[in-house]
Every structure is written in C-alpha cells, then in structure tokens.
Image (cartoon, rainbow, N blue to C red):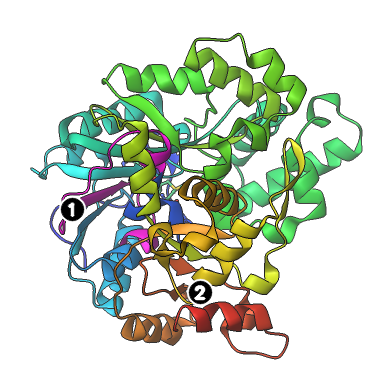
Amino acid sequence: MLSPTDCSVTDTLSGYVTDIPYERGFKPMLAPAWLDFAALLGGVTPPRPQPAFRWCDLGCGQGVTAAILAALHPAGLFHGIDAMPSHIEHARGLASDLGADNVRFDAVDFAAAGGLGLPPFDYIVTHGVYTWVAPSVRRQLLAFIDDHLRPGGLVYISYNALPGWTGDLPFQYLARALAETGAGDSGNRFAAASRLIQHLADADVAALAGSYMVRELHDNAGNYPRGYLVHEFLHTGWQPLYVTELRDDLAAFGLRPVASALPMENFDTWILTARQRELLAPIGDPDRRELLRDFCIDQRFRCDVFTRDAAPLDAEEQQSRLLNAGLALARAPSAITYRATTPAGELDYDNPTARAIVTRLAAGARCLAEFEASDGTPRDRIAAALALCAAGDLRPVETNRVTVGPINQALRRRLGGPAEVPLVALPCGTALEPEPASLLGMSGSDAGWRELLALHGV
Ligand SMILES: C[S@@+](CC[C@H](N)C(=O)[O-])C[C@H]1O[C@@H](n2cnc3c(N)ncnc32)[C@H](O)[C@@H]1O
C-alpha cells in the first residue's frame, strides 16, 4: 500500500521515463561494511557509530538493496526514496516479506524528500541515478545530501563516465529521439528504435560505427532486459560526465573524493600499464590525474565515495583498521585462480599469503587480525587481501553474524514468480547472486556454488 506522501503516477518525471519499471538488483558495494572499507582505502575514518547507523538510498528503484541490507543489519535504520510509486510498492512488499521493519520507503521525488523532515544519515548512496536525471534534479539530489549528511558521513555516487561513453552518444541521442513517438510503451518504442539503428549500422552509417551498445545489442541482445534499456537510454537528462565535472558538482557542496567503491580502481598497478604510470607520475593535481587515469582505461562507469569532513587516518591506524575489517569469500576456493585480467593486462597475485587467506576464510568470514603469524606479516596480509578484493574473490563484510534462514526462505518463495529476487543472503551482511540453475538446485548447478554456500553456513 502507498502512503499519502506518495506521488501520482506520471509518464515522465523532469524528463525521466517512468512508464515501465526498472530491474530488481542487489548492489553489494552499497553495504555499510563495503563503504567503510572504501573509506579505509582512502585513508579516512569510517562513520559508523556502533551499533546503530542510518543509511539512505536516493533513487532506490525497486528497493532490493535497501530491503536486503535492512534485513541483514537489524541494528541499522534504512531509508529508500524513489519517485516511482510502483518501485516503492515493490520495495515495501519485499521488506515486509523479509521481515525487515527497520526500513522505510517514500515515493517522493528528491525535492519533496527534502521536506520529509528526515534526520541525518551516516551513509547516503545513489546508484545509477545522477547521470540519468536532468541538471535541475541533480541539484535537488545534492541539496538533499547537503541537508542530510551527518558530519563525517559517506556519500556513494555511481555514474556513467566519459570518455568511455563517447562512442555511444549518437546511439543514445538517436534511440531517444526515435522512441519519443510510436506505438506501445517505452519498451516497445525503444525496441523499434533499436531495430532501425541496427539497420543503419548494417548500412555502414559512420556515426554508429564506434558504438559499443550497437555491437552489444547485435551480438548479446539477451543480456539487456527492456527495463534496463528504457531506464538506461530514454531519459532526456541522460548525460555521462567526466570525473572532473562530477567532482566539481560535489565540491560545490563541500564534498571531497575518498576512494572508488570498486577496490581494483584504487590501485594504479592494477589498472595502468607501466608506461601509463610513468606518464602520469609528474601530475600533482589529484583531479587532473584521475581524469588522465579515466582516459587511460576509457572509463565508462564510476562508483565513487565522497565525504565532507571525515577525519583522516594515519598510516598506523589505517593498517590496524584494515586488519580488523571483516572479509568473506565471494567465490569458492576452487574457483579462485590467483590471476586476473585488468586494463593493465594479466596480473598474477599467487603467493603463500593469498593462499593462506583463502584457506582461513573457507572456514567463514573473519578479519585478517585473527590469522596466525605464519599466514604472513600484517603488511603482506593486507596486500594479499587487497589483491583478492580487487579481483572479486573477497568482499568486505560485517564481523558479526545474523540469522538468515527466514530471509532466504522468503527469497526462495519468490523464485519463479513475477517479482523473484534471485539472491542468497549471507550471515555476514551481504548477499550473493548465483546462476539461476544453481539457485534452483537444478541439474547443471555448479559444485563451486554449493561449496561457497556451505562455507558460509547457508
Ligand atoms: C536507473 S534507476 C536506478 C535504481 C536503483 N538505484 C538501482 O540501481 O537499482 C534510477 C531511479 O531513479 C529514480 N528517479 C528518477 N528521478 C527521480 C527523482 N526526481 N526523484 C526521485 N527518484 C527519481 C527512478 O524512479 C529510478 O528508480
């Protein structure tokens, strides 16, 4: 049920198309433990007052991340804001199914959210929103953050970045222009526009030759559901930004960059070649340097963490906190190759300390400080754990445990239905998204998946 504060259904919202819903997805990097870890990598003190904290998702979509995180963090207070009533209705239903009574959802736009009288938040996250909405809406979103970020709090903001989207600018403009008219809902109109664009590309139209999306929709169309395509491409405010532009917007509100929430992107050796590092070495200004890095890797999507006034950590405190951060395996030990392909090339992180960490974590989530001295020096343990995190083998998690049986039963009951959320919640405060066959226990389900769940005790 919607509350009296909920907006009426409109087809567009300052140029944001709302006639069909967005996909349901869980974003693990929005979890407090993950954001705290990013803060540690950036050398600032994580904000979390123990045991309670307040977390807010601006443009929460279907509310999957907010509802799951609320169910997994009973001591936290969660809030989701989204202007699409159908999204909020789903979010409330999911939270109710999961038994999460520590989350509230409001179907309001960002301007109206400012008037809800909400108290300050330790974490404000906004995933896949900023570069999809009109400039006036971006200002409303930043004004909300300005008014509601607790001193020392963290802001997570993900956005489409340049230069990576450059080759797709003509594709997006044409798709949106063509889909403005025609039969059916915006999903049908995008499909018709996309068909014509494919024909034009086949006819060697030069303006579409550099488009990654044209190639993707030709070769892998099944990977792109209509809800994704409409919410990705059809808004009039769609505008990827260079990192310096985004940072200027946030600097106007006193927000400064802390780190990337994507661990790999915090390490030059993981994403830049030796020659690129040499060329960037003389660049002292951090914003210009980041811009150059984005050119080196043709950056397309950034997940950045900002703060206004978090206290800096000295090297000793940073090391101590990294040693005491919770870590969990996100891949079965048998699936970990200790090699990764990155923008810098093939990287090898196979060493005894990395193997010892995987062995220890196979007994369940824990922190590096709990390991034996024979597992490596504290410095080596941190270096090896960061490599494993950068490769996606590990993820930052809570150090305490919650009961997940009822949460997973509720998720299982939705499987096969129109609003399934194919996730498995873990007691350490995160959730995994398996291949469908594995989740349903069908033949072809993967032994690695069963191994991973068993070591997490689910
Ligand atoms: C691309 S979706 C991302 C949803 C969600 N963060 C996720 O990653 O699943 C963007 C969301 O922003 C919401 N949105 C767009 N304009 C808004 C506004 N002015 N106020 C509040 N929400 C808005 C949309 O309804 C949509 O759910």
Which disc is residue 53 wearing?
1
Residue 291 falls inside the magenta stretch: no
Asked whether, in this view, residue 332 is left or right of residue 247, the answer is right
Q: Is residue 23 visible?
A: no
State which quadrant residue 98 falls in: bottom left
Q: Which amino acid type is shown beneath numbered disc 1? A: Phe
Q: Which amino acid type is shown beneath numbered disc 2? A: Pro
Residue 56 falls inside the magenta stretch: yes
Q: Tag 2: Cα neighbours inside 10 Å, few (<14), some, or many (≥20)?
A: many
At which x and y percent is residue 260? 48, 37
At which x and y percent is residue 449? 61, 78
- The numbered mark, 2 or 1, whose residue comes first in the sequence reads 1
Closer to us: 297 or 8? 297
> Which residue range is magenta in the image?
38-66
Residue at mark 2: 422
Does residue 162 sit above or below 351 in this rendering? above
- Marks 2,1: beta carbons within 8 A: no
